[in-house]
Image (cartoon, helix red, strand yellow):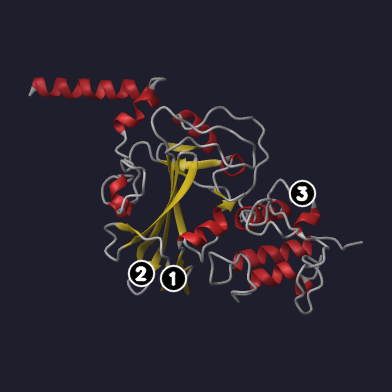
């Protein structure tokens, strides 16, 4: 018994020494269970990657799988999301501008899980899908995994599909025709200059505190400490949480547009032919948001893209308020109206002065 106790104590000392030393990132791949397939193509099952420890449906990250969350989140019919990042041993991301995606090393995997609480009829949590972006030879590839009803695994499916879903949120029942994207739909949002790119992991989106299992910390600093990011500038022009009513209304609305609309309405994006530019570093110019600007397409009774003080005459408000597939914005990722975004848009338009 004494010999066993001594052996366990030595193991504990060794683990503590390596995990606390400055060289801890050097043994990351020796400890993390995460595995890519030998030919760098997506595994057929989510569990094959070994991202999560214990019961997979708990989404408890294995060592080396780091949770993250952008300050403002993309709306997807009120789906909740858990995001993680994994990088291989001895590599890290580098800074490329406040509003640009971090320059990730090859074999980085971005993991995004979509789920709902209180799903009817059983009022249970249900994970619907896990989307992966995997960087291979400098290019990002998509891998879409749809979870089974038993919540024991998710399986590769790039064909897309829909399911009817109802859940209880804040005491009210909501329903949607939830969409699993196919490979073409993935590209609509993630393509820029004919290359696939992530959307969320930018310094401007990660520059705020996140509650980790070992305490709250600024995410960018956590990534640096973890060995996943090189040093960055100390002063980053950052978005805010658009749901945070303590923040100025203009920053909240610009932050909403950045995460929900800018991936299409930017140079090289799917809607780059439009005049609107919704990136956070572009919307300090009111014209880029369409304020007092004529719409490119006529919608009866709507005279400007945004007409200060008049939601009934503002095209942008109309597009956010409708669920007609050929008129609504964003055009992918939702079937129902985002009521909180609509409220925010109304508050912003009422806040604006006139066009004179």
Q: Residue at x 46, y 39 (%)?
A: 137
- Residue contact at pointers 2 and 3, CB within 8 angstroms: no
Q: Quadrant of the C terminus?
A: bottom right
Classed neighbour count for the residue bearing mark 2: other residues with Cα under 10 Å, few (<14), some (14–19), many (≥20): few
Q: Residue at x 73, y 48 (%)?
A: 282
Left-right relation of 196 to 160: right
Is 121 situated above or below 277? Answer: below
- Residue contact at pointers 1 and 2, CB within 8 angstroms: yes
Q: Earlier in the sequence, mark 2 or mark 3?
A: 2
Classed neighbour count for the residue bearing mark 3: other residues with Cα under 10 Å, few (<14), some (14–19), many (≥20): some
Label 1's element?
Answer: strand
Of the residues tagged 3 and 1, which is closer to the observer?
A: 3
User: In this figure, which residue is indicated by the disc labeled 1?
Assistant: 168
User: In this figure, which residue is indicated by the disc labeled 3?
Assistant: 284
**Alpha-carbon distance for marks 3 and 1?**
38 Å
Classed neighbour count for the residue bearing mark 1: other residues with Cα under 10 Å, few (<14), some (14–19), many (≥20): some
Label 2's element?
Answer: loop
Q: Quadrant of the N terminus?
A: top left
Q: Residue at x 50, y 30 (%)?
A: 224
User: In this figure, which residue is indicated by the disc labeled 2?
Assistant: 123
Q: What percent of the width, then of the height, locates residue 44?
A: 30, 54
Left-right relation of 190 to 66: right
């Amino acid at each position: 018994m004494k010999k066993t106790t001594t052996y366990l104590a030595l193991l504990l000392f060794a683990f503590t020494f390596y995990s606390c030393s400055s060289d801890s990132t050097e043994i990351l791949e020796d400890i993390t269970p995460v595995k890519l397939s030998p030919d760098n193509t997506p595994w057929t099952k989510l569990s094959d990657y070994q991202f999560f420890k214990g019961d997979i449906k708990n989404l408890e990250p294995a060592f080396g799988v780091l949770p993250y969350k952008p300050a403002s989140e993309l709306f997807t019919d009120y789906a909740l999301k858990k995001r993680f990042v994994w990088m291989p041993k001895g590599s890290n991301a580098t800074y490329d501008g406040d509003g640009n995606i971090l320059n990730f090393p090859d074999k980085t995997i971005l993991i995004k899980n979509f789920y709902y609480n209180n799903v009817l009829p059983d009022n249970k949590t249900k994970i619907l899908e896990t989307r992966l972006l995997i960087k291979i030879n400098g290019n990002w590839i998509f891998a879409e995994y749809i979870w089974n009803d038993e919540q024991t695994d998710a399986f590769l499916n790039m064909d897309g599909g829909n399911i009817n879903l109802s859940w209880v949120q804040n005491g009210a029942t909501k329903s949607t025709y939830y969409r699993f994207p196919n490979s073409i739909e993935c590209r609509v949002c993630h393509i820029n200059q004919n290359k696939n790119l992530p959307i969320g992991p930018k310094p401007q989106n990660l520059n705020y505190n996140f509650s980790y299992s070992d305490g709250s910390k600024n995410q960018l600093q956590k990534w640096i400490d973890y060995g996943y990011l090189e040093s960055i500038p100390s002063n980053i022009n950052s978005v805010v949480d658009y749901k945070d009513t303590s923040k100025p209304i203009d920053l909240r609305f610009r932050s909403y547009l950045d995460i929900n609309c800018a991936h299409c309405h930017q140079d090289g994006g799917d809607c780059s032919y439009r005049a609107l530019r919704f990136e956070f570093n572009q919307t300090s110019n009111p014209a880029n948001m369409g304020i007092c600007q004529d719409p490119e397409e006529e919608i009866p009774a709507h005279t400007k893209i945004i007409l200060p003080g008049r939601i009934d005459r503002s095209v942008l408000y109309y597009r956010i308020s409708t669920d007609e597939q050929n008129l609504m914005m964003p055009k992918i990722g939702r079937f129902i109206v985002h009521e909180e975004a609509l409220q925010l848009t109304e508050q912003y338009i009422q806040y604006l002065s006139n066009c004179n």
